Image (tube, grey):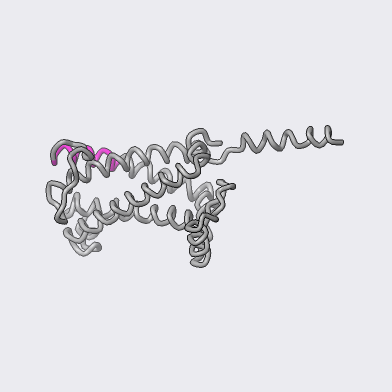
């Protein structure tokens, strides 16, 4: 009987080991997004240094482009990569039903409960195929932040051609502040995202090999 049970359990165990957690298209757009975002942040800091909004500048060691013109070229190249890749991600996320399955529903109570569990070290990470409420909120929020940073960036880049869009942000100067704070939100998200990946290394493995 025990032999039969072991035999019956073996396919299930094998199936669990080979289960695809992150499909190929998710992994591809994730890493392309990662490259594009890092390039945009580093070049954006160099652009910021040319006309600071606040009483500080970013160290030259963490910027790319060398000067304003070079940084703008890097920024625009990364922008198109981010926009095209982002559109692919949004389209496939909706068409495949991934957003509905992974990001919904979200409730205030669920977010508060999972936040409390995380702060007390009681939040389970056993099943990485399911997002907890905090993850759902963060991933949904960063999608909205990504849309806002692109739109505000267009308003800054072409304020005459996109004058209606610039006006929606309250003008060129306010669009710059929106763009800056959206960048800060992305940097904050990246810090949390990387920290969670280090805490739960199997999630990083899944984003690399899918399983």
Quadrant housing residue 163: bottom left
Membership of 149 in magenta stretch: no
Q: Main secondary structure of the magenta part?
A: helix
Task: Quadrant for the N terminus, please.
Answer: top right
State left or right for residue 177 relative to residue 85.
Answer: left
Give the residue at x 22% y 60%: 164
Does residue 181 sit above or below 15 in this rendering? below
Q: From where the camera sits, is residue 25 visible?
A: no
Give the residue at x 19% y 51%: 158
Q: Which residues are magenta?
A: 68-80
Give the residue at x 46% y 38%: 27
Q: Residue furthest right?
A: 1
Q: Give the percent coordinates (x, y) of residue 188.
A: 34, 52
Q: From where the camera sits, is residue 124 visible?
A: yes
Is 198 in front, or is 175?
A: 198
Q: How many marks?
A: 0
Is 127 in front, or is 145?
A: 127
Q: Give the percent coordinates (x, y) of residue 139.
A: 44, 52
Quadrant housing residue 194: top left
Q: Give the percent coordinates (x, y) of residue 155.
A: 22, 54
């Amino acid at each position: 009987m025990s032999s039969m049970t072991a035999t019956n359990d073996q396919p299930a165990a094998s199936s669990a080991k080979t289960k695809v957690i992150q499909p190929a298209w998710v992994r591809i757009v994730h890493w392309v997004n990662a490259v594009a975002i890092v390039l945009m942040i580093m070049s954006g800091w160099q652009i910021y240094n040319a006309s600071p909004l606040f009483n500080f500048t970013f160290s030259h060691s963490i910027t790319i482009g060398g000067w304003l013109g070079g940084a703008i070229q890097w920024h625009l190249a990364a922008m198109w990569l981010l926009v095209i890749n982002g559109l692919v991600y949004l389209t496939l996320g909706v068409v495949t039903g991934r957003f509905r399955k992974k990001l919904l529903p979200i409730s205030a109570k669920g977010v508060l409960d999972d936040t409390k569990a995380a702060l007390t070290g009681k939040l389970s990470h056993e099943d990485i195929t399911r997002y907890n409420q905090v993850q759902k909120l963060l991933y949904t929020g960063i999608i909205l932040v990504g849309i806002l940073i692109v739109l505000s960036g267009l308003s800054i880049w072409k304020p005459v051609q996109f004058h209606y869009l610039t006006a929606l942000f309250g003008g060129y100067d306010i669009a710059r502040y929106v763009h800056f704070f959206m960048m800060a939100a992305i940097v904050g998200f990246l810090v949390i995202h990387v920290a969670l990946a280090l805490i739960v290394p199997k999630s990083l493995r899944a984003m690399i090999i899918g399983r």
